[in-house]
Amino acid sequence: MLNYRFILYVLGLLLIIEGFFMLISGGVSFIYGEYDLIYNLVSAGISIVLGGTIAYLTNDVEKHINKREGYIIVSMVWIVFSLFGLLPFWLSGEIPSFTDAFFETMSGFTTTGSSILTDIESMPHGLLFWRSIIQWLGGMGIIVLSLAVLPILGVGGMQLFVAEVPGPEPDKLHPRIAETAKRLWVIYLGFTFAETILLVFGGMSFFDAICHSFTTMATGGYSTKQASIAFYDSAYIQYVIILFMFIAGANFTLSYHAFHGRFKKVFHNEEFRYYFSFVMIIAVIIGTVLYFTGDDLGVERSFREALFQVVSIITTTGYATADYLLWVPFLSLMIFVLMFFGGSAGSTGGGIKIVRIVLLLKNSALELKRLVHPNAVIPVRLNNKAVSQSIVTNVLAFVVFYILIFGVGTVIMSMMGFDMETSLGAVATSLGNIGPGLGDVGPSSTFADIPAFGKWFLSFLMLLGRLELFTVLMLFAPAFWKQ
Amino acid sequence: MRILIFGAGEVGTHVAKMLCNANHDVILMDEDEEKLQQIEAHYDLMTIVGSGTSIANLKEANVKSCDLFISVPPFQDMSILASILAKKMGAKKTVARINNNEYLVPDNKEYFKQLGIDELIYPEELASEEIAASLKQVGTRQLYEFSDSKLVLFALKIRDNAPIANKTMAEVSTMHGTRNYNTVAIMRDGRTIIPRGEEKFLHNDLAYIITTHEAIPQVLDDAGKVQFEVNNVMILGGSRIGVKVARLLGDDYNVKIIEIDKNRATKLADILEETLVISGDGRNLELLKDEGIKKMDAFIAVTGNSEVNILACQLAKKIGVRKTVAEVENIDYIDLAENIGIGTLINKKLIAASHIYRMTLNSNVAHVKCLTAVDAEVLEFIARESSKIVGKPLRKLGLPKDVNIGGIIRGDEAIIANGDTIIQPEDKVVVFALPSGISKIEKLFT
């Protein structure tokens, strides 16, 4: 029997936390003296009062969870957070349609960054801040945050942690899960702070700097400007953002080691080396082609535009300084392929994740060797250690599901009347939590024209992608519900 | 406290769980990944696949920042080596499990100190001591002595024939004018209850009672237990525990030991001069009858097989042996064995775990005892001048619900606690605590 009361209890507590962050947005509205203050406060009030009531009523429950409750809690939290997180947008009338508001909020929490807004600059500051902070919360993870601040989740916390943190096998930085979560958030906070300072140095306003730092570290991609980062015609700002996107797409455990002076651990990490190489090689290829085919950008500019788009897409951030759809088809296609890569395990990025791709490629290559030597024991090695067969199987299943969902999703989108490019792009970008897609949903367009059903469907894909398929898919498996 | 445990066997995992519940930072290390997966999914700890005898693995586990290194792998040699390495690499304190009595001799202990092993744990030795102690006080399920036996804790099965059955705690405490024992906990249907005044003793309750040494006969009387002297003892199984018990009981008792393996029996006969060694299958009722099981006062089953021990004790009870002791190593069976009325249950893992656990508590704790049948501990604290608990009547302290103060030893005097008791500095206080209450009560004594 599932412990439903405990699930409600946890959701109640988490809603209070969400309400608290709405209050912060309210503070921003207050500072700017804008009309959205009341809507932020009302939304915060609704979340806190409702969350508090639920938590209070279920407080007496036995505080213990199993695997199944863990998966339900994690999936539900993201849906509940989006449902309440849309309140400020919806109540204030800035996004009058409920569907649109849900899409925008889910796209925020899952750090996708696909937007339906056509005039971002006209939004009041409080709402822009809320739009950025939901990405920041979703980046490191709602559950990881709650593990750090709610001691109650300590027991069984590992279940929740595994269900939310990306990658086949999460690392622990400390024997206690709460301490691990705290360390991750401290690093996350530190990087966000550092980026804000550096962006302010580059001449960005303090408000924009904070918002952009939130969405960079989350690899989210919401900008406070309609033109995204292209608005800032400053090489310095763009390089700073490239650097922090790259850090956010790397495993946060490695940042932790780097802070402790253990650089060897960072550079010897195989996933990091592949991640770095992929980015560099592809950026150089695109930069070179861009230099020769583009309209006279110069070496630095070509390389910067290539690097920015490559890092933005591979880390699944989704900022833009150029419209890659205007590049030669060879380059657009390369960007499309990059959409499947995703960041590293244990990062805030989405997608399939570098480590899975590396494992998959290695395993497939070794399969040839295994065919030659049918009796040989040939394990897949990562970081000079044999990877257990169960992990390889898990990765294979993950990739199969990913491709399957991508395929089926594309067909569903095309049934709504979209051309092939748009369908492929919209599904790839939603599932990978990236932001811009191809065709009608490219970097210069928005998702506003997609019909309501399409928006709900893409929102679902975003959630699937953020929780790495299994957490959500499991809820649809009959085995999950059998006693 | 940061604690590294090497060996995810039964003792290792049990200690890890306990320490985890007590909010320590626990790292569990074992070479077998499968053993680790199960516990990692359910407890908030870190696991490392590796061996405590590998320097690289110890480094990976960051042994230099560990406050305590617990070495409980399957083999003694590994255990000792791992502890030595851990200490040299910077672990503050090391504990190694051994299975050689020789090492425990005080003179030899010094060698291990020099090597870097601070404490040695020999679970079989501890278990045998507990068995021997239980024979001294028949009628009880478990018996522990605190502060040179000035206060004793024991577990009693309450039957309908007990004078205190179906009476409330408040009624019982006024039965004899003065209150000379304290019921700190009741185990009923698998639940542990901390009884308050209106709680009743019911049939089949297992009551944990703290009392002074002098009042023991009265408590046994109240619980309807008939006292008898143990003379004839039969031990089933010539395991290490069996041999140790036979040795401890020595001349004072008439001991027979039954061992199924012929070679082992021959060896036992060699090392146990005072004991009659019988070679045969203890599950054979004819054999037991031939060896006069009917005349036995106590039957101790300590074969390596928990099921055999439980069944053999059941059989002995049926024949009429009044005191039975079974070694039950499978922790999940304990609850079951308790309910079907096997007398005293011995589990060497729990015994070892409570010894190790003691090392993680602060210096105000003099003793700790993990109870076999319930998930709870009994701790002996020393109150200090600065302790919060000092100087106020207990009822005004707002004590946590999951602890119960049993008694106090002040100098040579033992006092049974009640709501008006005021704790003074240097008092030794015996406290019963559920796992959730340990850290709370610890704070009151700092």
Image (spheres, rainbow, N blue to C red):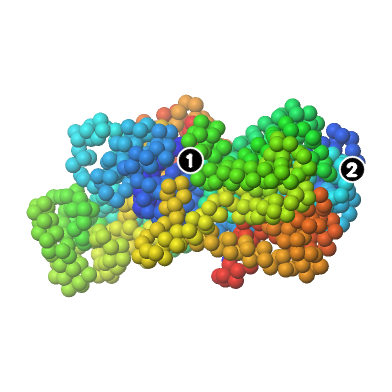
Rendered view: B315 above or below B276: below
Identify which amino acid the numbered label 2 is placed on: Ser
* Discs 2/1, front: 1
The local crowd at label 1, few if under 14, some if 14 to 19, many if 20 or more residues have their Cα within 10 Å, is few
Counting from the top left corner in percent of width and height, residue A21 is at 75, 42
Depth order, front residue of A388/B314: A388
Q: Residue furthest bottom?
A: B286
Numbered badge on residue A122? 2
The local crowd at label 2, few if under 14, some if 14 to 19, many if 20 or more residues have their Cα within 10 Å, is few
Picture residue at 55% right of the left edge, 32% below the top: A259
Q: In the visual, does A213 lie left or right of B295?
A: right
Numbered badge on residue A19? none
Picture residue at 69% right of the left edge, 46% below the top: A289
Picture residue at 65% right of the left edge, 52% below the top: A338
Counting from the top left corner in percent of width and height, residue B88 is at 32, 32
Chain to which mark 1 belongs: A
Depth order, front residue of A335/A406: A335
Residue receiving disc 1: A268
Mark 2 → mark 1, Cα distance in angstroms: 47 Å
Picture residue at 89% right of the left edge, 43% below the top: A122
